């Protein structure tokens, strides 16, 4: 049944799920302080689409393939940790390379933009634990599950835009340190997802 409580629960679920994506968006803004508004929309949109899709995929697994979901669920924290460690370490290395080129040169040289591949990996890593949301909406029919997932996606988009804006403002001041800090944030998010899912689930 779609009512105020259903909408409110979906919004709160979206806020909770978007925290990892917010942290990664913050790191993206730090790493790319000159990011255009169009690119900000694309980056936040990718995270929103993944956060929208994962609960629906989880709903499908739980509703139709419950035994398969239990197998997949075990690997979620390991995949997220591996992806975010890889991207985070890469950003830290890039930051120190930029430092070694000299602060003056680094200040003139625009920060390297993240590739589409890296963006997709970040989208998967920050949303993969949202598969578990399929458990909370498994009793819903497809239209209700789709609406809940849509609300989660919209909330994620808004929160990620905020994260990028904050990161950009900070990144302009930090120069090469921004890439190092952004990489550290990604590693921290990966560890948080891993610990939360392995030790507290």
Image (spheres, rainbow, N blue to C red):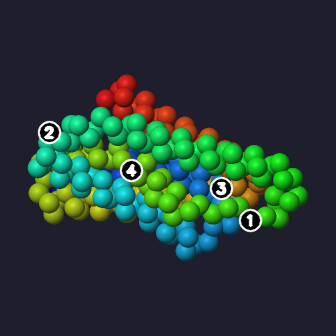
SS type, badge 4: helix
| Figure quadrant of residue 88 | top right
How much space separates mark 1 and mark 2, taking CA atoms? 49 Å
| Residue 38 spot, x, y in % from top left | 55, 74
Q: Which of marks 2 and 3 is nearer the N terminus?
A: 3
SS type, badge 2: helix
| Figure quadrant of residue 180 | top right
Q: Name the residue under label 3.
A: 31
| Residue 171 spot, x, y in % from top left | 70, 55
- Marks 1 and 2 close (CB-CB < 8 Å): no
Q: Which of marks 4 and 1 is nearer the N terminus?
A: 1
Q: Residue at coordinates 83% horizontally, 65% vertically from top-left?
A: 108
The dot on residue 127 is 4
Q: Residue at coordinates 43% horizontally, 42% vertically from top-left?
A: 80
Bin the neighbour count of mark 3 within 10 Å (Cα to Cα): few under 14, some 14-19, many 20 and up.
many
Bin the neighbour count of mark 1 within 10 Å (Cα to Cα): few under 14, some 14-19, many 20 and up.
few
| Residue 141 spot, x, y in % from top left | 11, 57
Q: Indicate left or right for 115 with 14 as reference.
A: right
Instruction: Evaluate whether residue 122 shows in this view.
Output: yes
- Marks 2 and 3 close (CB-CB < 8 Å): no
Q: Indicate left or right for 155 with 98 as reference.
A: left
């Amino acid at each position: 049944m779609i009512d105020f409580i259903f909408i409110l629960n979906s919004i709160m679920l979206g806020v909770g799920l978007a925290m990892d994506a917010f942290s990664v968006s913050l790191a993206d803004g730090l790493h790319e302080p000159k990011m255009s508004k169009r690119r900000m929309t694309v980056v936040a949109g990718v995270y929103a689409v993944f956060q929208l899709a994962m609960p629906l995929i989880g709903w499908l697994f739980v509703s139709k393939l419950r035994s398969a979901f239990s197998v997949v669920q075990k690997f979620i924290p390991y995949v997220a940790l591996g992806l975010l460690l890889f991207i985070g370490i890469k950003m830290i290395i890039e930051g120190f390379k930029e430092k070694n080129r000299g602060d003056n040169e680094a200040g003139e040289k625009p920060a390297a933009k993240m590739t589409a591949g890296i963006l997709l990996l970040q989208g998967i890593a920050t949303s993969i634990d949202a598969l578990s949301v399929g458990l909370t909406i498994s009793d819903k029919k497809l239209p209700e599950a789709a609406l809940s997932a849509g609300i989660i996606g919209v909330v994620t988009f808004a929160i990620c835009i905020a994260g990028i804006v904050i990161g950009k403002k900070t990144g302009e001041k930090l120069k090469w340190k921004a890439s190092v800090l952004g990489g550290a944030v990604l590693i921290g998010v990966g560890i948080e997802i891993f610990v939360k899912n392995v030790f507290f689930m």
